[in-house]
Image (cartoon, grey):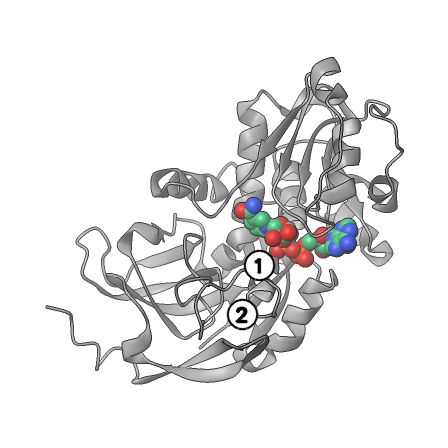
Amino acid sequence: MAEDLTAKVPAEIPAFVTERQGDQVSRGAATIARDGLGEGEVVIKVAWSSVNYKDALATVPNGRVARVSPLVPGVDLAGEVVSSADPGVRPGTAVVAHGYDLGVAHHGGYAAYARVPAGWVVPLPPGLSPRQAMIIGTAGYTAALSVDQLERRGLEPGSGPVLVTGASGGVGSMAVGILAARGYEVVASTGKQAEHAWLRRHGAAEVIDRRELSEPSGRPLDKERWAAAVDCVGGTTLASVIAGLRQDGAVAASGLTGGAELSTTVFPFILRGVALLGVDSVQTPIERRRAIWERLATDLRPRDLDGLAAGEVGLDGLEPVLDAILAGQLKGRTLVRPG
Ligand SMILES: NC(=O)c1ccc[n+]([C@@H]2O[C@H](COP(=O)([O-])OP(=O)(O)OC[C@H]3O[C@@H](n4cnc5c(N)ncnc54)[C@H](OP(=O)(O)O)[C@@H]3O)[C@@H](O)[C@H]2O)c1
């Protein structure tokens, strides 16, 4: 029998809701009913969520992210379990959840409470508070997966410079912080002239203007520059990265803020042995996800984690922040406080 949540969860829950009406999408602070939280064994009081590029896509007409309407966006959340019908997840536990259908086909983190399947829940490892877990969030988890993929292929701190594109953004700044903490020589590519010093503070040894990469040389192979790269930009930037990797280098590709098309040749692959590694944070099996979170609390913990939080916002202040991330204007990680 389902647990009676009356004493634990208010009947009307503060939330940020997006709703499609024909070609239009409305969005804003509202409430959702306790009985409308969706399916799942675990009810979480959400302490923090965060702003990711995908969250903004979930709230715009051509975003191709939201698969239900109305929807509470928020692809990640951290908080405390208030009720659980699964013996493996105890009430009172601090947890994080992200990916799978969260915030796209199942109500996400932009609400004071969330109900999720037990198989989506990651207990927070010691050393990470819910706030720190959401400074990391989907972006930091994706950066960690990227570094993990590169290291599985043999990358190590002495290998040479590692390029991070979109470096001032969420995935990018987290990658800079993780790589710097592990002793890599980090080259940060950014379009934000004003953030060069900020990137150096967070661990970049060198900062380059992103136009060096977004305007391709037209040559199939460029000078060998990087031992590896973490790319969340895609498009012509990713093509330039592939052409500039050193012999046996690799790029972990996760994003498309610079474009979804990829035009390249086979030469970097067959003449330099480079590898293009795809990174998907959404469908990682839960055991691997929990293991990566253990590492985010220890050997993949970003340098100056608290300093990578660039701002906090409530549900009623979210709209302009979602527009800003789509315009590529956000720096670091922005936290959402849904309570
Ligand atoms: N595969 C996955 O599982 C996964 C997980 C998380 C995110 N992602 C994807 O990764 C990307 C980044 O997400 P995010 O949340 O980190 O977003 P974000 O905070 O907006 O960071 C993206 C950065 O890309 C750069 N950028 C923006 N527009 C650009 C353009 N037109 N040309 C070149 N660079 C541009 C900007 O950095 P600079 O100003 O510093 O250049 C921007 O800060 C998104 O495409 C997102 O969907 C994928």
- Asked whether the residues under the numbered discs 2 and 1 touch, taking CB atoms below 8 Å apart as contact, a structural biologist would say no
User: Could you say where residue 151 lies in the image, as x and y percent from the top left?
Assistant: 57, 26
> In this view of the protein, can residue 188 be seen by the observer?
no
Pick whichever of labels 2 and 1 is earlier in the sequence. 1
- Residue 138 as seen in the image, left or right of residue 198: left
Residue most toward the left?
A: 1
- Residue 169: give x, y in percent of width and height: 69, 54
Question: Which residue occupies 10% across, 68% down?
Answer: 1
Q: Give the residue number, with chain letter if any, for mark 1.
A: 54
Q: Amino acid at mark 2?
A: Val
Q: For mark 2, give the secondary structure.
A: strand
- The spot of residue 7 in percent (x, y) is 21, 81
Does the closest atom of ligand 1 sit within 8 Å of the Cβ of label 1?
Answer: yes
At a point 68% along the width and 21% down the height, the residue shown is: 274
The residue depicted at 85 percent of the width and 58 percent of the height is 194
- How far is mark 2 from mark 1, CA to CA? 15 Å
Classify the position of the C terminus by image quarter. bottom left
Could you tell whether 267 is left or right of 140 in the image? right
What is the quadrant of residue 95 in the picture? bottom left
The image quadrant that residue 242 belongs to is top right
Q: Is residue 33 above or below residue 88?
A: below
- The circle on residue 336 is 2
Please name the amino acid that badge 1 sits on: Lys
* Foreground of the two, 150 or 132: 150
